[in-house]
Amino acid sequence: MTHKNNQPKPDDRSDNIEKLQQMVQDTIANMEAAEETAQFSSNDAKGQIEEKNERRKEAIEGMKAEIADEKEDQQQM
């Protein structure tokens, strides 16, 4: 039995801002698609879509805060 040296990968945060920005764009696209779907949905489904979009809005705010933190960290380097 051979044991491999299991070391963690180095912390490469160089593209975090780009990844976070893409996540924000994807989440906005999902919100827009959900709103279109809601037009043809029952009242129960509309309520669920609205609730999910509210959670998405909160997630976007968190991602934007992370982007700001990443930009600040990069400026300090």
Image: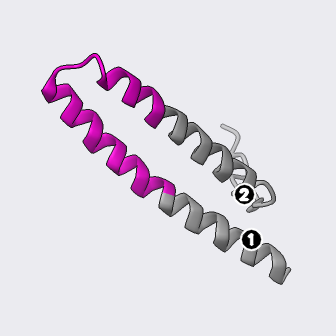
Q: Is residue 5 above or below residue 25?
A: below
Q: In this view, does 20 lie above or below 45?
A: below
Please identify the quarter of the rendering in which residue 41 is found: top left
User: Image check: 28 left or right of 73?
Assistant: left
- Could you tell me residue 52's position as x and y percent? 31, 41
Q: What element carries label 2?
A: helix
Q: Residue furthest front?
A: 39
Q: Residue at x 70, y 69 (%)?
A: 70
- Could you tell me residue 59's position as x and y percent? 45, 54
Q: Residue 45 versus residue 65: which sits nearer the camera?
A: 45
Location of mark 2 (residue): 17
User: Image check: 57 left or right of 28?
Assistant: left
Tag shown at residue 71:
1
Residue type marked 2: Ile
Q: Do the residues labelled 2 and 1 touch (CB within 8 Å)?
A: yes
Q: Residue at x 44, y 36 (%)?
A: 31
User: Image check: 30 left or right of 8?
Assistant: left
Give the mark nearest the N terminus, 2 or 1.
2
- Could you tell me residue 53's position as x and y percent? 36, 42
Magenta span of residues: 31-60
Residue type marked 1: Lys
